[in-house]
Amino acid sequence: MGVSGVLEWWQEWQLRTLVLSSTAIQLLLYLFANRRKHATSSQFRTIIWLSYLGSDAIAIYALATLFNRHKNQDSTSSSTAQGSRILEVVWAPILLIHLGGQDSITAYNIEDNELWKRNVVTMVSQVTVSIYVFCKSWPGGDKRLLQAAILLFVPGVLKCIEKPWALRSASINSLVSSDDLVPRTGKGNEQGDSISPESYVEEVRKFVIGNGDPFEVNVNASDTVGDNHEPYKLFVDLSLPYSIRLLDLKSWWKMTQFDAYIQLTKKLTETFYRLYTKSKMLDKQQNRYLLTGFLRVVSVYLPFAAIGLFHNSHRQAYNRYDIKVTYTILCCTAFVEAFAAHGWNTPMMDNVLPWFYKVSQCRLIGSYAGSSTKSCDSVVDIIELVLQHVKSGWKDCITDFPSYRAFSDHRGQWALRRNNCDQEDLAWSLRVPFDESVLLWHLATDFCFISKRCTNEVATRSIEISNYMMYLLLDNPEMLMAGTRRNLFTTAIHELEGILGNEPHEIQGLAQKIIVNVESTNGDPSFIRDACALSKVLLSLGDEKMWKVIKGVWVEMLCFSASRCRGYLHAKSLGTGWELLTFVWLLMLYMGMEPLVEKLQRAEFSSVIGSGTTADAPSSSNETLAEREPKTEVPNGGGISAAAPLSSDETLAEWNQKIKAPSGDEGNIGDVPSTSPDIIVIDIKEDNAS
């Protein structure tokens, strides 16, 4: 077959191929699109992504081909071509149904929901083209075929309306504004929250220590546990009233780690369907439920009626290949729509057994040695550690509202303090930037793990969390912490190459080689040197205490990172494979921890922890760091006045002698009330006149 033969074949089969390809893609998306929420391979995700993009592209291309082929209706006069042309016109409404998309994947990424306006323009243009081609090209004669085409146009147009509607409903602005009334957080009155923040902490403390109102929870009643609000609200950073948080905490407190995992999976699944599918369209709580239910019935039953009408039409007069193609696309489209309408939002795999998600791993030393680290199945075990951490916090650390706010600010300090290890040789590693702290503790944990060749459960969980945090730093830095520097990983690899060279190494014994080489040479400070020093201090604690400290630090770092990640990023991760960090973040919120939105909207920038400690005074919008930096604490007594500002060459002790003026003197700080606390903070500002 020459080039002319290929072109002739393509001219004849082009539209058939496009329509069959569009049908095959719809079938593929129906069967596998929901699985993208699980931990699947990158190849599988690529196939789903290409199918999602190609479904619209092929349908639009097929409609454009149909339009071009029929714009000159009288160009061919043979009966065979005329019959083929009639069936091709009937394919137009089927392509509209395909263009409406599958219910299980209205959006692949969360950003797709924000493009609903563009989708409206696309749908209007394609519906217009389809109707124009049909009206211009229909030759008349076969009334049953005409009736079948009209019946197919109805669900086709409705699905084209439904898709941008679903995208708009799942957009962030729409979700944020979905509630008519927004309760005022932290106000114990009838118009807002039923309890104040201080009362919330007090009520939780009473419940935790057993003096509160007993609240028995039947964890087997999975449909009612924690159903005090829709989980999507947390993903759009909406702050819940303290009364709702109290109910959530009481519901989740007595759960085992497995029960908590099941409930978290259900909440995440519900949010996934709301953001990435047409779940909101069939929500019985919505006012439009009857309308969407009617659209669903129309989409299901009219294609079957169209099949019957086509079967009773004068199909013998048409091209035999077109007849087979028409039967194929009609039957596939009808059955996919029927199955999708009756069970798309409750996939079989979700109802039979819970899906155990993978925890991604990345080991820096393994990457240097050329070995890959496989994902692990430890989500439930890590959830247990987080549960224990939060419960211990409510029992032993949180005593009032300021300490409640400060609890999620810990990123290992509490673990050191509980184990009497808060000396400087360990504490310094937690005061560096968070991404550097993660890198240092990852290397130190690996050195300890390899040196001791540990196989106990605590060591295994610690190394798994360590590898997961390194994975976030390398592959998902925006979730680890805003401003995380991914190139820290590359920097550490270059440091290892400078210490050991580029020769291949086995992981076993590698840690000892690194430590020996670092100790035998004097070099500039580096991550590897600092990690070696950190690991030596940890190894000196003894095996049991060492792994207890390492586990505590990693759990706190994991919770710290989760609490600092925006709900939008967690929602985004649902469409590309669920992250362990999202499980931890959602669990902490259901266990009553402070959400990020409240941290960002605090009136002050740091919490008051304990008595005798003052919080940093909030700076005004036009106050520079240099202007607010010199602050001192002076005892309340005698009179105090600001006699002169602190000059650049003046010590604090010299300036201290100037402020012992009578209390009646006027100064920049004003009079000090007699009821002032024992410690006050004076904000020293530069005198404008000086």
Image (cartoon, rainbow, N blue to C red):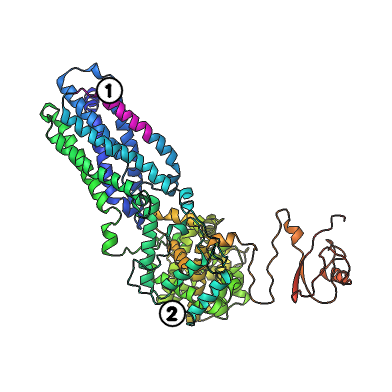
- Disc with the residue nearer the chain's start (1 vs 2): 1
Residue at disc 1, secondary structure: helix
- Residue 379 is situated, as x and y percent measured from the top left of the image, at 39, 67
In this rendering, the label closer to the viewer, 1 or 2: 2
Q: Badge 2: how crowded within 10 Å, few (<14), some, or many (20+)? A: few
Q: Residue furthest front?
A: 190
Q: Residue at x 35, y 52 (%)?
A: 279
Asked if marks 1 and 2 touch (Cβ < 8 Å), the reply is no
- Residue 100 is situated, as x and y percent measured from the top left of the image, at 32, 40
- Residue 338 is situated, as x and y percent measured from the top left of the image, at 23, 47
Kind of residue indicated by mark 1: Lys
Which residues, given as a range, are shown in magenta? 123-140
Position of residue 604 relative to residue 328, above or below, is below
In whole angstroms, how far apart are the C-alphas of marks 1 and 2?
73 Å
Position of residue 170 relative to residue 439, above or below, is above
Q: Tell me if residue 264 can be seen.
A: yes
Q: Which residue is mark 2?
A: 214
> Relative to the observer, which residue lies in front, 102 or 433?
102
Q: Seen in the image, is 272 located left or right of residue 518?
A: left
> Relative to the observer, which residue lies in front, 331 or 189?
189
- Magenta span has 132? yes
User: The C terminus appears in which quarter of the rendering?
Assistant: bottom right
Give the main secondary structure, helix, strand or loop, of the magenta stretch.
helix
**Residue 421 falls in which quadrant of the image?**
bottom right
User: The N terminus appears in which quarter of the rendering?
Assistant: top left
Q: Which residue is mark 1?
A: 136
Q: Badge 1: how crowded within 10 Å, few (<14), some, or many (20+)? A: some
Residue at disc 2, secondary structure: loop
Kind of residue indicated by mark 2: Pro
**Residue 216 falls in which quadrant of the image?**
bottom left
- Residue 604 is situated, as x and y percent measured from the top left of the image, at 65, 63
Q: Residue at x 44, y 55 (%)?
A: 571
